[in-house]
Every structure is written in structure tokens, then in C-alpha cells.
Image: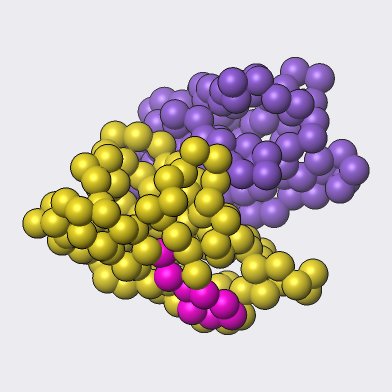
Chain colours: A yellow, B purple
Amino acid sequence: DVVLTQTPVSLLISLGGQASISCRSSQSLVHSNGNTYLHWYLQKPGQSPQLLIYQVSNRFSGIPDRFSGSGSGTDFTLKISRVEPEDLGVYYCLQRTHNPWTFGGGTKLELK
Amino acid sequence: AVQLVESGGGLVQPKESLKISCAASGFTFSNAAMYWVRQAPGKGLEWVARIRTKPNNYATYYADSVKGRFTISRDDSKSMVYLQMDNLKTEDTAMYYCTAELGGDYWGQGVMVTVSS
């Protein structure tokens, strides 16, 4: 199975600051159809996860442009600029290229 | 608006069975692949199972941890997706989320399953 390693495990950020989260895969996430199915989710405290970014760099409906995704192959990054209070929670990457799908271990974003 | 409502959770003993359900509304259910994700208390997310649409022969996929014990199914006429869980183990204790693939993903609020003697 594909293993996704997220770093850091936790992140202390000041309001208005920038956060960067890495997600590294144990194998390439490029599908045979040429697409890369690497997605990012945020789970706010007490809530269900919500989709932020799909296929590496596409923001989902209603997601502000403070969130951006990048990367290719096995290395991916989520960046959050101008961090706001509603951005706090746990961020997960998910690969949907290979069965079974697998999540990263999560990165907790907290206020400094 | 897209809505997913899970039900059927509860407390069961090890080796028992339980079937949880997810009622979908606000979209054309038959066009959406569906999947279940679980989260043990205080832990991260774990993808559990997925079922595709009729044109894709309702193909199903499972995490290794549940393969052979869990069965995902759907009823397009009722806009429902199910997860039949057999031979439950204490490590299956988790919040179970139903999710719809609609370009992006939509998640339900989850249903708690506790496996304990």
C-alpha cells in the first residue's frame, strides 16, 4: 500500500503568518491516465473533514486563494498564507491514485 | 444542497455484526461514487471502502484492515449507501463518515460505532 508521510506533525503559526505542510508518498501518484490524485483536507475541531484542494493544485468550491497546493510525483506541499483563526485544525493529504486509498497521518495547525 | 446523513451506529460486542447507512440528498445519487472513512477516537483518518456507479459495474474496493469483514453496497433507487460490518473487532471502534464524490467531496457528520465487551 502507498504510505503518505506528512511533516510536520504540528505547526505553530501566528495569525497572518504562512504555513507549509509536506506530504511525501512512498511511490509516484501519477495515474496511468496522466492525472495525479493527491488531495488535501482540513478537519476543524469537532467537525467532519472538508476538501480544500483536489488533484494537487485545484481549490475546491468556496476555498479562498490563501490555500494553494503544489508538487508532483511523490512530493507535495500545501501552503496557507495569511493564516486566519478559521484555518486551525488538522490537515490531511489523501492519495486516490492507487487502491487502497491512503491518508497521511495529519498535521495539526495551532496558533502561536 | 448536498446532504449526507449517517445512521445505525451504536455499541456492539466483538465478533458481532452491524450495518450502518447513509441517506443522500441534493444531488443525482446514481452518478456519484461513494465511500466510507473512519476515525478512531483521537486518531487520524482511515479510508475504509468505496463503491463506484452502475456504468462502472458497482465496483468495490476495501482497505486491507477490513477486507473480508466489511461489505459496501448501495441502493440507487433509495439514494442510500450501506456498510455491513461483520466479525467486528475492538479496533473498529471509530466515527464512520459517508462521503460522496461529486467532482469534489462532500462528507456527512458521521456515526459512532463502538466495539466493546
Position of B101 relative to A65 (above/below): above
- Provide the residue span drawn in magenta: A71-78
Q: Quadrant of the N terminus of chain A?
A: bottom right
Q: Quadrant of residue B102?
A: top right
User: Where is residue B51 drawn, in percent x and y?
Assistant: 72, 44
* Residue at horizontal 27 percent and vertical 70 percent from the top: A8
Front residue of B6/B88: it is B6
Residue B7 is left or right of residue B94, and the answer is right
* Residue at horizontal 50 percent and vertical 30 percent from the top: B108
Q: Quadrant of residue B79?
A: top right
User: Where is residue A85 drawn, in percent x and y?
Assistant: 21, 42
* Residue at horizontal 27 percent and vertical 40 percent from the top: A86
Q: Quadrant of the C terminus of chain A?
A: bottom left
Is B82 colored magenta in this rendering? no
Position of A14 relative to B89 (above/below): below
Front residue of B15/A60: it is A60
Residue A18 is left or right of residue A40, and the answer is left
Position of B13 relative to A88 (above/below): above
Q: Visible in this render: residue A95?
A: no
User: Where is residue A46 drawn, in percent x and y?
Assistant: 29, 34
* Residue at horizontal 36 percent and vertical 44 percent from the top: A43
User: Where is residue B99 drawn, in percent x and y?
Assistant: 58, 38
Query: How many badges with numbers are in the image?
Result: 0
Q: Visible in this render: residue B83?
A: yes
Helix, strand or loop for the magenta stretch, by majority = strand
